Amino acid sequence: MEESKHIKLNQAKWNKWSESADGKGWLYDYLRRAQLGVISLLDIKEKTDFLDIGCGTGWAVGKVAELADNKGSFYGVDLSSGMIEKAKEKFKDDGNFHFIVANAESIPLADDSFDNIICTNSFHHYLHPGKAMKEMHRLLRKGGKLFILDPAADSWFIKVVDKIIKFIEPQHVRIYSTDEFKRLMSDAGLTHTGFKVITGRQKVQIGEKL
Ligand SMILES: C[S@@+](CC[C@H](N)C(=O)[O-])C[C@H]1O[C@@H](n2cnc3c(N)ncnc32)[C@H](O)[C@@H]1O
């Protein structure tokens, strides 16, 4: 699909979704539980410079700031202006929080800025996954860690689900297997250090900038 059309379709979908994104229900419970699973893997000592790519309304950004006792900087990036407006509204009184409307494939932030980057249930929407992975590498400091949570196409079930979603939703890109994540990370200069199963068939793929 042409890039501008892909972006427009995604923005329309997620702007609509943002209207109810902090709502209640099994889907939000599921997303929050998955995010908490990823956050539990972060190793935060004194402080952290943290980025969430595809951050939605910034829920995980707020949780990580709590965990770090608000020491450090807490960034969220999302393609949807609706999501980012909500995030800004929630955290408007705190100078440590920064929310930016941007495509994960081109993020207007400086090289080597972060020691932890997460990306939860968002990576499979990126049209050029290799470009997004290179951005993640560029933004991490040496020794920084990357945590990407998504369903993993390691089973026939998820491979079929991937095809069905593609059929229903033309802007859906792809769900990747663990081996594909390893390759994407290595091509971007990151080392895949392992994965953790979080909920059901979702895995967190962990990378490091050595
Ligand atoms: C299912 S929501 C997940 C939100 C949040 N990360 C969570 O775990 O609840 C997917 C998010 O990815 C964002 N997104 C989709 N494509 C994107 C892109 N190319 N760059 C940045 N964000 C994107 C959407 O706007 C949406 O907020």
Image (spheres, rainbow, N blue to C red):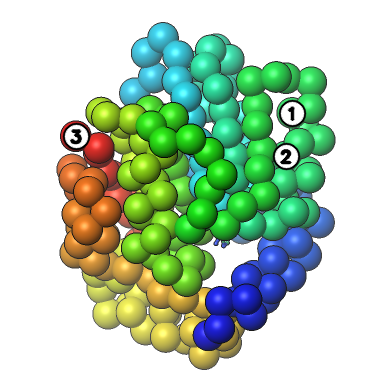
Asked whether, in this view, residue 209 is left or right of residue 173, the answer is left
Residue at (45, 14) in percent of width and height: 47
User: Callout 1: few (<14), some (14-19), or many (20+) C-alpha neighbours within 10 Å?
Assistant: some
User: Callout 3: few (<14), some (14-19), or many (20+) C-alpha neighbours within 10 Å?
Assistant: few
Tell me, yes or no, whether the two marked residues, 1 and 2, touch with CB atoms within 8 Å: yes
Q: Which mark is residue 144?
A: none
State ligand 1's quadrant: bottom right
Could you tell me residue 129's position as x and y percent?
39, 64
Residue at (63, 57) in percent of width and height: 79
Q: In terms of secondary structure, where does tag 2 sit?
A: helix
Could you tell me residue 144's position as x and y percent?
31, 31
Q: In terms of secondary structure, where does tag 3 sit?
A: loop
The amino acid on which the numbered mark 2 sits, given as a three-letter code, is: Ala
Give the residue pinned by disc 2. 87
The amino acid on which the numbered mark 1 sits, given as a three-letter code, is: Phe
Give the residue pinned by disc 3. 210
Q: Is residue 108 above or below residue 210?
A: below
Residue at (53, 12) in percent of width and height: 71
Q: Outermost residue toward the bottom?
A: 167
Camera-nearest residue between 27 and 72: 72
Asked whether, in this view, residue 128 is left or right of residue 22, the answer is left
Q: In terms of secondary structure, where does tag 1 sit?
A: loop
Question: Rounded to the nearest whole Å, what is the CA distance between mark 2 and mark 3?
Answer: 32 Å
Residue 152 lies in what quarter of the image?
A: bottom left
Give the residue pinned by disc 1. 91
The amino acid on which the numbered mark 3 sits, given as a three-letter code, is: Leu
Mark whose residue sits in front, 2 or 3: 3
Camera-nearest residue between 200 and 125: 125
Of pointers 2 and 3, the one earlier in the residue sequence: 2
Question: Does the closest atom of ligand 1 sit within 8 Å of the Cβ of label 2?
Answer: no
Could you tell me residue 5's position as x and y percent?
64, 80
